[in-house]
Image (cartoon, grey):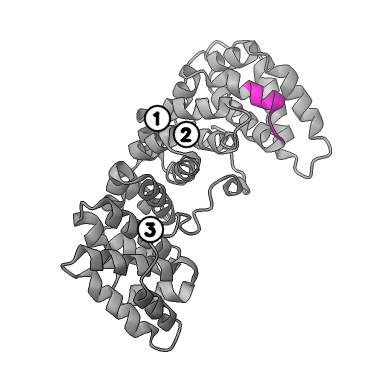
Amino acid sequence: MLTTVNNDNSFSAFSDCNSDRSAEFSTPSSESRRLLIACAADNSDEFIRHLVLNLHSCSIEDQKQATMEIRLLAKNKEENRVRIAKAGAIKPLVSLLSSSSDLQLQEYVVTAILNLSLCDENKDLINSSGATKPLVGALETGTPTAKENAACALLRLSRREEDKIAIGRAGAIPPLVKLLEGGGLRGKKDAATALYAVCSVKENKVRAVRAGVMRALVELMADLGSSMVDKAVYVVSVVVGVVEGRAALVDEGGIPVLVEIVEVGTQRQKEIAVGVLLQICEESWVYRTMVAREGAIPPLVAFSQSQSHSHSNRPRHKAEKLIELLRQPRSGNGAGRS
């Protein structure tokens, strides 16, 4: 039985994806400002219905303006997210995302859907309206901001296992891996956060391995001075839950990187790296030999000793278990790579 890395504080290492963090869109006209101020008053529901009607307009400029204002209204206020959904905005937003080839409108719609998805009441309606596939499309072909916000929206829509399965089957994993590889810092963080969430499902772990996620993760882990090390180690800890993930980690040179993290990483990085090394060594003598040859035992002993006064015994117990495995003589039936 494989040990899994389970850290209740893991999401503190990731992008919060709490709201769009893109720069403000073009400054609204004075009329739009007047309407936005009016929205805070008693006629806000009427104003929101006006915006929803404009989503159906034949004018792309009207659609952009309405989408921009919906995004702004939904950015920080929960009650506005509920009102907008009840006014029927979600289905036309999804329809625009599915049908429009205008990249600016696509970015506006993705961002509006992200902000609406922050309300738990809206998540099921967004999923049932068919948002997953067009969000994946934006993740593949959108502007940098659209890709980042699409990754965040998919994260917010992945509460349940069936949602994560649907996201994986809609093709989200390869573009998330591509964003992890080539995006800016925010894009990398958002991709890592989404991958960590959706790869709790076994079939998505396999998809991630096939998309080349382990190469990107090992490269990010190796840059010990970057802010991506924690995030990369956490995603690795999930993906190595399948045999393909463990093999890919070894093939991409992950063992020496993890041993170095145990030696010189932060406390949190060391804890997760120890857990990952334990996962890959538990059922493979070959991997144990490789880990031992990288000189893992001395830093593991040092880590275990440093945990003697820790509030939690789990990291120390994992390190001690791993040390015991590495010191075991080769058994007759333990030479498999799995």
Provide the residue span drawn in magenta.
259-266
At label 1, counting other C-alpha atoms closer than 10 Å, the crowd grade (few under 14, some 14-19, many 20 or more) is many
Disc on res. 209: 1
Position of 240 relative to 184 (above/below): above
Camera-nearest residue between 238 and 69: 69
Q: Is residue 16 left or right of residue 116?
A: right
At label 2, counting other C-alpha atoms closer than 10 Å, the crowd grade (few under 14, some 14-19, many 20 or more) is many
What's the residue type where badge 3 is placed? Thr
Labels 2, 3: front one? 3
Q: Which structural element holds mark 2? A: helix
Secondary structure mostly seen in the magenta stretch: helix
Position of 301 relative to 53 (above/below): above
Q: Which structural element holds mark 1? A: helix
Camera-nearest residue between 51 and 113: 51
Question: Which label's residue is closer to the chain start, 2 or 1?
Answer: 1
The number of numbered discs placed on residues in the rendered structure image is 3
Residue 280 placed where, x, y %?
54, 25
Q: Is residue 242 magenta?
A: no
Camera-nearest residue between 136 and 241: 136
Residue 141 placed where, x, y %?
28, 43
Disc on res. 111: 3
Query: Which quadrant is home to the N terminus?
Result: top right
At label 3, counting other C-alpha atoms closer than 10 Å, the crowd grade (few under 14, some 14-19, many 20 or more) is many
Position of 127 relative to 78 (above/below): above
Residue 301 placed where, x, y %?
76, 23
Residues at circles 2 and 1 in contact by the CB criterion of under 8 Å: yes
Q: In this view, does 172 lie to the left or right of 98?
A: right
